[in-house]
Amino acid sequence: MKNIYSKSKGFSLVELIISIVIISMVVGGALLAFQIMQQNTSSSIALNKSNQISDFIFNKMERDIKQAGIFYDIDTISDYNFDSDLVAAANNYDIDNILEIKSSYWTLNICYDRTKFERIRVKYRYDQDSSTSGGNLRRKKEIVTRCNEGLNNSLYEPIAKGIENFEINLNDNKFTLNLSLRGTNATTYNYEKIILFPQI
C-alpha cells in the first residue's frame, strides 16, 4: 500500500526577502515619523520658551524706559532737603549719555522719580560673551539723589543668560531692541521691539 504524504507549501526565498523588505519599510517609516514628531515637539518647546524670554525682557525694559525722565518738581518740596542744583533733573540727567555702547557690552541708564520723595536709577548691562555660553543681561536698581551719581556696589539682578545677541539703538527718541535667542538644532529666533522714549 502506498503512503500518501500531505505536502504543505512554504515560503520561497523570494517571498521571504520581499516580506522582510516590506516589514523593514514599515518599521523604518514608523521610526522616521516618531523622530520627526520628536523634533517638532522639541522645536515647539524651544520656540515657546524663546517667546516667553523675549516677552519678559521686552516688557521689563519697556516699563523702565517709559518712566525715564518723569520728574516731580522736587525743588519746591521742602521734605527733600536737597540743594536745588543737585535735585533738578535738568542739571543731572543727560539724555545723550543714557545709552553707552561698547564692542563687547552696552549699558542703559534710566532715571525717574517714583514718588515726590524718591528718585530711582535703573541700570541695564548686557555683556556679550565670546564663548559658547552666550551673552548675559543684568539689571540693578537703586534710590539716588542725583541721576548721574555713581551706583553703589549692589549686585546686579540677572535677567537672562545664554543670549545669542542683543543690540539696542536710540534714534529720534525711539529705542530699537534686536534680540536673538538660541533654539534647537542651531536654530536662532530673532525678535524686535520698538519703544518710544519719553521727551524730557
Image (spheres, helix red, strand yellow):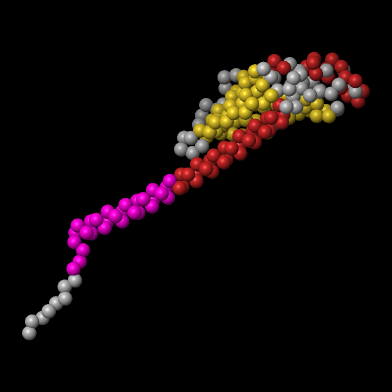
In the rendered image of this protein, does residue 134 appear above or below residue 148?
below
Question: To which quarter of the image does residue 120 belong?
Answer: top right
Point out the stretch of residues depicted in magenta: 9-36
Q: Nearer the viewer, residue 150 or 173?
A: 173
| Residue located 52% across and 43% down the image | 44
Please identify the quadrant where the C terminus is shown: top right
- In-image side of 46 versus 87 (left or right): left
Question: Magenta span: helix, strand or loop, mainly?
Answer: helix
Q: Nearer the viewer, residue 114 or 14?
A: 14
Q: Residue furthest bottom?
A: 1
Q: Is residue 49 magenta?
A: no
Q: Residue furthest right?
A: 78
In the rendered image of this protein, does residue 181 appear above or below residue 169?
below
- In-image side of 47 versus 66 (left or right): left
Q: Is residue 19 magenta?
A: yes
- In-image side of 120 versus 4 (left or right): right
Question: To which quarter of the image does residue 18 belong?
Answer: bottom left
In the rendered image of this protein, does residue 84 appear above or below residue 190?
above
In the rendered image of this protein, does residue 92 appear above or below residue 62?
above
| Residue located 65% across and 18% down the image | 171
Please identify the quadrant where the N terminus is shown: bottom left
Question: To which quarter of the image does residue 117 belong?
Answer: top right
